Image (spheres, rainbow, N blue to C red):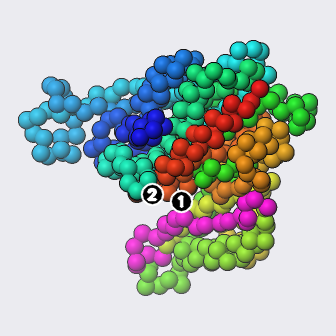
Amino acid sequence: MTRTEKLLADLIALPSVNPAFATQNVASARRASPSKFGEKNVADFLASIAAKAGLEVEFQKVLPFETERWGETPGEPVCASDHPGSRGRSPHQSKETVFRSNLIVRLLPRNKIRQTILLAPHLDTVDADDSQFLPRVKNGRLCGRGACDTKGSVAAMLSALCELANAKSRPNETEIIFAGLIDEEHAQAGSRALVRSSAFRRLGQSATSPDRLKSELQTTLAIVGEPTRLQVVTAHKGSVWLQLETRGKAAHGAMPWLGQNAVREMAGIVSALETDYAARLRKRKHLLLGTATVSVGTICGGTQPNIVPDRCVISIDRRTLPGETETGVTREIAALLRSKSLSVKIFSTKLAPALPLETNPKLPLVRQLLRSIGQVKPAGVDFFCDAAVLAGAGIPSVVFGPGDIAQAHTTDEWISLASLERGRNLLLDFLKSLP
Ligand SMILES: [Zn+2]
């Protein structure tokens, strides 16, 4: 096993499930080991590796997180009815508040800082069962939760940075920052906090000033780690989540003519979205991203067969192209449904905006990265990530990392070991090429 492979295996064995997914399944969260949720274990582990390599390490507190600890030492029994088999063992629960923190690792240049490269993968993963936290090597693949999304990028980026820190020749004027971000899989609290902090605001603010918009003066590039099959990605779609609600009038199911059926109204809306609206979106094309899309994700209406339902709610996922906004999307859906005499209320359900990404591929640092990797044209991907948050704050951002998004969030997530190693080497070569 190479160092990077070993690092990735260690990271998989340290679960860092986003705590947002704990509340969705309380029973499984209780059964799980208390350390399954939160990025702390991974961040601490990476911090110790970085410190050993002589890098500057700090944490940025982002969100408080209450962990539950279950023990069998004497204490007040709680939820006794949930644990019928535990009589006499006196299980007890104690709560401890810890902070979920971004990990910031810095390699300073020998001379004055003239440019900054930000390596920004996320540390959290989606949920998994316990077997997925046991890393396994099989047929040239490393399997386990987070292997490609996105602990593979974490391992490739940090191991490249540690090697660079101890290399004979390293950049004299380029500052390199590794930012292990929390909460990408849920509401991107990590990247949103990062760009709000004064240390990082300087990178973004100046980038939006008229001078810095001139591409030749670009002095910052964020490389956000996500599985892109080692393609430099300069564009991704945004995502808008909306809830649509129809209202009707309840009546006895034997006399439906006395009521007004909210589910039937919604059936017309679902059909209009999936046919007319989807067709309209297919005509809207982006060179790197293809078309915008709409998908009806959930539907809920009515209470029992013999009541005419007076309410129905659907949720939709609308993937947006650069230039499209939530307000614009809401307006066009409302107008389409109005034109078909369908009556609906529309609500936004995203905690925070998930905007599309479109970075100018002609920016000098982007061109240099493309050249260094041997890629002729930039690529685009469908999925949203932290890059849009950083770019929204004025930090030019691309997405790059080993592994394939097709394996992300699957029950047998894996990464090709060849891709992992190549990703680390490509990053190291690029960083070494900087002044
Ligand atoms: Zn993911």
Q: Residue 223: image x %, image y %? A: 67, 39
Q: What's the residue at 77%, 15% (across, down)?
A: 112
Residue at the left extreme? Answer: 88
Whether disc 2's CB lies below 8 Å from ligand 1 is answered no
Q: What residue span does the magenta drawing correspond to?
A: 287-308
Residue 176 on the magenta span: no
* Residue placed most toward the observer, 303 or 122: 122
Secondary structure of residue under mark 2: loop
Identity, as a three-letter code, of the amino acid under mark 1: Ala
Q: Quadrant of the C terminus?
A: top right
Using the rendered image of the protein, determine whether residue 113 is visible from the camera's viewpoint.
yes
Mark 1 and 2 residues: CB-CB less than 8 Å, in contact? yes
Residue to which mark 1 is pinned:
406
The answer to whether residue 40 is left or right of residue 296 is: left
Q: Quadrant of the N terminus?
A: top left
* Residue placed most toward the observer, 390 or 118: 118
Secondary structure of residue under mark 1: helix
The answer to whether residue 397 is left or right of residue 135 is: right
Residue to which mark 2 is pinned:
410
Q: Spatial distance from mark 1 to mark 2, Cα to Cα?
A: 8 Å
* Residue placed most toward the observer, 114 or 285: 114
